[in-house]
Image (cartoon, helix red, strand yellow):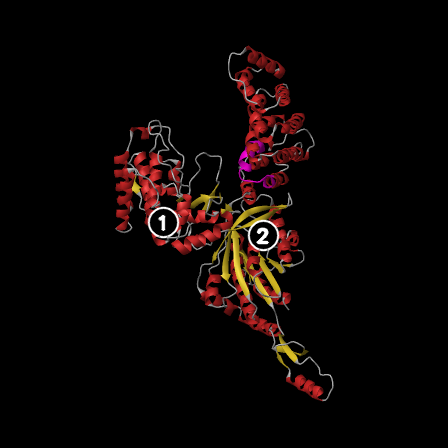
């Protein structure tokens, strides 16, 4: 049905007056938009649909929430109806009635304001109905539940959820959206502020769950692979830091690098002919090439247009060098670089500089670009002549860019209306590294230049592994909550450990006698096997005689062997938190020694003991500085022998930071589970309960450690704790059950630790 033309037709004026009377709404703002809304509605709605449209708007005008809901519905419903059909109106009206009857009437306005954008992502009635069902469930589960008081409290997060729904549905399926909503409701039923932060996408776990549920290639999943790519191909290393890739922004944030690392989008979808991981590689290659070949230039004497041209020429220069070293990158860059159409920009009314530079960039990359502009072809030729002489330099290419601006500049380039179509090259960084200033400002962008460089022990860190953490209050995991960095422990003087072992020479001799009883003995022969590793000659000859004599021979003529010994792998996990620096009195003289020094003595004796037994074992330490920085330090690997290299690392042990035990145990299990052994033992040595600077509920990390013990049990890993805290009985049983020992007399630790190990593995 075509809309009536806007004329002075009395019949149209009369019909419009009738529609306005049916609406029965006195807000003056409605009168300003009513005719336009009705023309749009009549174009897509049946007569019955028009009646439903006006009846619903009348209800919204009379419910006492002001003019905003009426305006939102009048303007948004016709395009929604054209997409999903007017038959969807009763379900939408029912959702609004439910909100109106609840304490959530103020959420009707954001619900209506975003409904058209939601419908564009859910273009069928069935999909839209699932969204409406989800909003109903959301309302029921979060209304009146604050602090468990069953009164009429509005849902804290519902308006924020409606406001974010279009953004969420651009990244999630309706099933993924349901999972995201369910996590927020389960984890923050009694925390209004946290609930609002979650559903407004401000909290870290909100974004973490969003990443888990969204499509595309997630940086968090590929971080280690990309770090190896950066190191292996480019001989470079930097922390990879994600930033939210917001599809709602008309001009999206670009990658960049600074003192704190390389900033990349947190997720990338596949592009035509290019996978998400290859898009990340293209960006990393571009940035790594800048770091290798670009030299900062002074920006003070360049205009914005000149700087833009220099950046495009410099980007093209380093990409030419990339493709010279790795020709396979050409295919990826050609697929990702836009192809602006010649003549697509109107130079009379629009600034076309960005368009011209994008055409030039494409032409420098693609020999078959097909452009015919004379100036463009001239500078393409100059560029390739410059590059043919070698790597060129940032200064030389900047001179070429300035010449291009001088030759092609137009008066219209200064217009505010800029042509952006096919000019965004998403894999390139924003080139902030390319510019220096004679006079530094105090702008926010300059703060990064004053940041201290990374501390020395961070240099050889591996990329982080992300582990979940158990939230006992919601009985669910917080996904990718903990960032764990592993590295090789620095070395000290191996002679320090030798002197400690000499100090305990008498104890070592006593342990040696016990160890001899536990050592694996020789192989044991298993005879009378139908299948085995070798022939048992005695039985075989007897069977042959029986066969020759006509009797039935014994078919068990083979034998095999088994080791009469141990099949055990061990990981010793040391708590290296700050409390290990505390001093304790030792000996009759009342002298003092730190818990860390006693731990060094005990672990050295334990390592010597395990080496005597021949069990494969590893030693690692851990401490943490919030969930963003859990440090896992390798002291001895399974493939390393007990010797000076390992002793040197033990000698350099230091105490610091906090004790996020669950993450360290999960990571230790990652290595222990890979060992080929019948029995696997994780031995934890600690002097206190799990704690960290960013956790205020002391039960949280205790419950997470308990959950990690359960996870290890399911993997067939036996965990045991040696605790040096006299108050450990209050919490250690909650974590390890009965599998723990509390050593009250800490000075006996060097003696007790090896004995406990032998008792556990006898």
User: Furthest-front residue in view?
Assistant: 1
User: Furthest-right residue in view?
Assistant: 551
Comparing labels 2 and 1, the label whose residue is closer to the camera: 1
Residue displayed at 37% across by 42% down = 449
User: Furthest-top residue in view?
Assistant: 10
Q: Position of residue 335 (x, y in %)?
A: 42, 45
Q: Is residue 95 left or right of residue 376?
A: right
Residue 289 tag number: 1
Q: Toward the viewer: 679 or 657?
A: 679
Residue displayed at 65% across by 59% down = 739
Task: Tell me the quadrant of the picture where the N terminus can be found.
Answer: top right
The answer to whether any part of residue 286 appears in the image is yes
Q: Is residue 468 magenta?
A: no
Labels 2 and 1: the sequence-earlier one: 1
Q: How many marks?
A: 2
Residue 157 vertical placement versus 672 (above, below): above
| Disc 2: CA contacts within 10 A as few (<14), some (14-19) or many (>=20) | many
Magenta portion: prevailing SS class = helix
Snapshot quadrant of residue 394: top left
Q: Is residue 175 magenta?
A: yes
The answer to whether any part of residue 259 appears in the image is no
Residue 564 tag number: none
Write the start and end of the magenta stretch as one range: 160-177
Q: Position of residue 49 (x, y in %)?
A: 62, 23
Q: Position of residue 286 (x, y in %)?
A: 38, 47
Q: Position of residue 289 (x, y in %)?
A: 36, 49
Q: The residue tagged with tag 2: helix, strand or loop?
A: helix
Residue 662 tag number: 2
Q: Is residue 203 left or right of residue 562?
A: left
Snapshot quadrant of residue 18: top right
Residue 439 vertical placement versus 459 (above, below): above
Q: Is residue 22 left or right of residue 306?
A: right
């Amino acid at each position: 049905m075509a809309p009536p033309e806007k004329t002075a037709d009395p019949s149209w004026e009369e019909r419009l007056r009738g529609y306005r009377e049916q609406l029965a709404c006195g807000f003056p703002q409605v009168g300003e938009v009513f005719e336009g809304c009705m023309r749009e509605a009549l174009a897509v709605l049946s007569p019955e649909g028009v009646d439903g449209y006006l009846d619903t708007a009348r209800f919204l005008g009379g419910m006492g929430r002001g003019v905003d809901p009426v305006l939102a519905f009048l303007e948004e419903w016709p395009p929604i109806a054209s997409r999903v059909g007017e038959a969807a109106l009763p379900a939408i009206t029912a959702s609004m009635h439910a909100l109106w009857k609840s304490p959530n009437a103020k959420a009707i306005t954001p619900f209506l304001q975003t409904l058209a954008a939601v419908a564009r992502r859910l273009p069928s009635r069935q999909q839209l109905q699932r969204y409406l069902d989800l909003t109903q469930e959301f309302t029921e589960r979060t209304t009146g539940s604050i602090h468990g008081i069953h009164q009429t409290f509005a849902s804290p997060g519902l308006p924020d959820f409606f406001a974010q729904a279009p953004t969420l549905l651009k990244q999630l399926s309706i099933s993924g959206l349901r999972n995201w909503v369910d996590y927020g409701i389960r984890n923050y039923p009694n925390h209004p502020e946290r609930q609002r932060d979650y559903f407004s996408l401000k909290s870290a776990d909100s974004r973490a769950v969003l990443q888990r549920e969204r499509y595309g290639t997630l940086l968090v999943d590929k971080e280690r692979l990309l770090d190896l790519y950066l190191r292996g191909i480019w001989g470079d290393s930097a922390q990879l830091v994600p930033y939210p890739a917001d599809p709602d922004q008309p001009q999206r944030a670009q990658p960049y690098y600074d003192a704190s690392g390389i900033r990349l989008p947190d997720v990338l979808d596949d592009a035509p002919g290019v996978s998400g991981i290859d898009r990340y590689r293209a960006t990393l290659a571009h940035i790594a090439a800048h770091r290798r070949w670009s030299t900062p230039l002074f920006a003070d004497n360049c205009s914005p247009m000149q700087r833009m041209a220099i950046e495009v020429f410099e980007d093209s220069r380093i990409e030419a060098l990339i493709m010279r070293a790795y020709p396979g990158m050409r295919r990826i860059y050609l697929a990702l670089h836009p192809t602006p159409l010649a003549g697509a920009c109107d130079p009379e009314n629009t600034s076309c500089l960005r368009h011209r530079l994008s055409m030039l960039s494409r032409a420098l990359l693609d020999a078959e670009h097909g452009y015919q502009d004379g100036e463009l072809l001239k500078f393409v030729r100059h560029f390739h002549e410059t590059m043919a002489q070698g790597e060129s330099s940032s200064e030389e290419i900047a001179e070429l860019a300035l010449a291009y601006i001088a030759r092609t500049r137009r008066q219209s380039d200064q217009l505010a209306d800029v042509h952006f179509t096919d000019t965004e090259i998403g894999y390139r960084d924003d080139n902030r590294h390319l510019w220096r200033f004679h006079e530094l400002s105090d702008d926010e962008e300059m703060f990064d230049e004053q940041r201290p460089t990374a501390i020395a022990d961070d240099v050889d860190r591996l990329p982080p592994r992300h582990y979940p953490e158990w939230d006992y209050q919601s009985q669910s995991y917080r996904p990718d909550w903990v960032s764990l960095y592993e590295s090789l422990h620095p070395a000290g003087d191996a002679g320090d450990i030798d002197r400690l072992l000499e100090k305990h020479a008498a104890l070592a001799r006593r342990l040696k006698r016990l160890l001899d009883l536990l050592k694996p003995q020789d192989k044991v022969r298993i005879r009378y096997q139908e299948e085995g590793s070798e022939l048992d000659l005695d039985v075989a000859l007897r069977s042959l005689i029986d066969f020759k004599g006509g009797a039935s021979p014994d078919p068990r003529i083979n034998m095999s062997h088994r080791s009469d010994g141990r099949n055990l792998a061990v990981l010793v996990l040391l708590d290296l938190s700050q409390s290990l620096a505390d001093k304790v009195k030792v000996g009759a003289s009342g002298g003092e020694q730190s818990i860390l020094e006693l731990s060094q003595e005990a672990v050295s004796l334990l390592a010597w003991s395990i080496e005597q037994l021949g069990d494969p074992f590893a030693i690692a330490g851990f401490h943490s500085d919030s969930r963003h920085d859990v440090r896992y330090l390798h002291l001895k690997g399974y493939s390393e022998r007990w010797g000076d290299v390992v002793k040197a690392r033990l000698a350099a042990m230091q105490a610091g930071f906090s004790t996020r035990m669950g993450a360290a145990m999960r990571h230790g299990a990652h290595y222990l589970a890979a060992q080929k052994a019948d029995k696997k033992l994780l031995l934890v040595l600690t002097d206190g309960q799990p704690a960290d600077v960013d956790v205020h509920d002391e039960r949280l990390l205790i419950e997470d450690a308990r959950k990690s013990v359960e996870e290890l049990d399911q993997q067939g890993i036996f965990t045991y704790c040696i605790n040096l805290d006299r108050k450990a009985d209050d919490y250690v049983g909650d974590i390890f059950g009965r599998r723990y020992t509390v050593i009250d007399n800490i000075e006996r630790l060097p003696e007790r630790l090896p004995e406990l190990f032998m008792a556990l593995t006898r």
